[in-house]
């Protein structure tokens, strides 16, 4: 079955630690995105990538980094510079023709120890 | 003022009732209007997608867009307990980048058996 796989489902970060969230898709979509969801707030865009080896900052990119070395993979690193990382992180993908029709993974809940 | 406003609820209705969920927005450039359904601790899934004004029906779901009032609605007929979820409205001006998709904060819906 085609879809987006995010791992791990739960992740804990210690102070000063960088952590990486995995996102893999087998939908053959060119575009991939990372969103952050906080309770009572809408989804906020962290980074997005329209093609391999290219990505752009979203609205809240500070303290995060990404890479897009393969079409299928778009990992997100939450760095120690992100002072409030506790949130639900969602990876999504779309085709160039239907950019508004996002396919989401099942999310990663990141918490600070 | 947020670009997209959505009542967070929670909204609780008995099984079989008609549910009305709404969002207002301020950006008159929005042309694409979406409704996503999100079950607890899962990724959102696209439920309805509308371009410009008018109505769109899909089974028990009807999406309405009134661009003159900057108001969109989602109606659920014959509501079922399985409809209990958070419903996110989203909209876009349709520029080349999906960074312009703006999400509402979501309405939590509960259908009582």
Image (cartoon, helix red, strand yellow):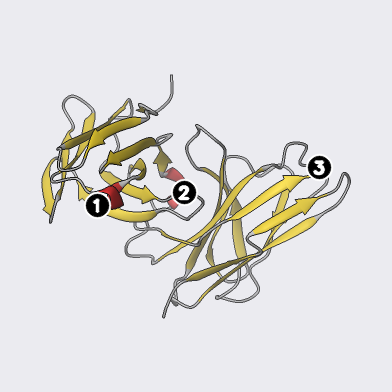
- Quick one: which residue is furthest to the front in this view? B113
Q: Residue at x 62, y 60 (%)?
A: A9
Height in image: B104 above or below A30?
Answer: above
**Residue B84 drawn at (x, y percent):** 33, 45
Q: Kindly report the distance in space between the C-alpha atoms of the residues bearing marks 3 and 2.
A: 29 Å
Residue receiving disc 3: A81
> Which mark's residue is nearer the viewer, 3 or 2?
2
Chain identity of mark 1? B
Left or right: residue A81 compared with residue A33: right
**Residue B95 drawn at (x, y percent):** 37, 48
Residue receiving disc 2: B40
Q: What element carries label 3?
A: loop
Height in image: B69 above or below A14?
Answer: above
Chain identity of mark 3? A
Residue A94's tag is none
Residue receiving disc 1: B49
On whether disc 1 and disc 3 are found on a single subunit, the reply is no
Point out the image quarter for the N terminus of chain A.
Answer: bottom left
**Residue B73 drawn at (x, y percent):** 21, 35
- Quick one: which residue is furthest to the bottom in this view? A1
Chain identity of mark 2? B
Height in image: A12 above or below A6?
Answer: above
Q: How crowded is mark 3: few (under 14 residues within 10 Å), some or many (20 or more)?
A: few
**Residue B25 drawn at (x, y percent):** 31, 28
Q: Which residue is drawn at 47% across and 49% down?
A: B40
Left or right: residue B42 compared with residue B52: right
Quarter of the image for residue A6 reads: bottom right
Q: How crowded is mark 2: few (under 14 residues within 10 Å), some or many (20 or more)?
A: few
Q: Kindly report the distance in space between the C-alpha atoms of the residues bearing marks 2 and 1.
A: 22 Å
Point out the image quarter for the C terminus of chain A.
Answer: top right
């Amino acid at each position: 079955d085609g879809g987006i796989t995010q791992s791990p489902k739960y992740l804990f970060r210690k102070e000063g630690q960088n952590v990486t969230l995995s996102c893999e898709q087998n939908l053959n979509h060119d575009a991939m995105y990372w969103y952050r969801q906080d309770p009572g707030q809408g989804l906020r865009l962290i980074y997005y990538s329209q093609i391999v080896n290219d990505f752009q900052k979203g609205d809240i990119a500070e303290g995060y980094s990404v890479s897009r070395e393969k079409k299928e993979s778009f990992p997100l690193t939450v760095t120690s510079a992100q002072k409030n990382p506790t949130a639900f992180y969602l990876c999504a993908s779309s085709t160039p023709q239907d950019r508004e029709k996002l396919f989401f993974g099942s999310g990663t809940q990141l918490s600070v120890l | 003022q947020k670009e997209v406003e959505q009542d967070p609820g929670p909204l609780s209705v008995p099984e079989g009732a008609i549910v009305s969920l709404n969002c207002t927005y301020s950006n008159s450039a929005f042309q694409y209007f979406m409704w996503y359904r999100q079950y607890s601790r899962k990724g959102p899934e696209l439920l309805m997608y509308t371009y410009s004004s008018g109505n769109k029906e899909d089974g028990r779901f009807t999406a309405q867009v009134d661009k003159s009032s900057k108001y969109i609605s989602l109606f659920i007929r014959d509501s079922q307990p399985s409809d209990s979820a958070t419903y996110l409205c989203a909209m876009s001006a349709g520029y080349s980048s999906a960074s312009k998709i703006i999400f509402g904060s979501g309405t939590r819906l509960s259908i009582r058996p």
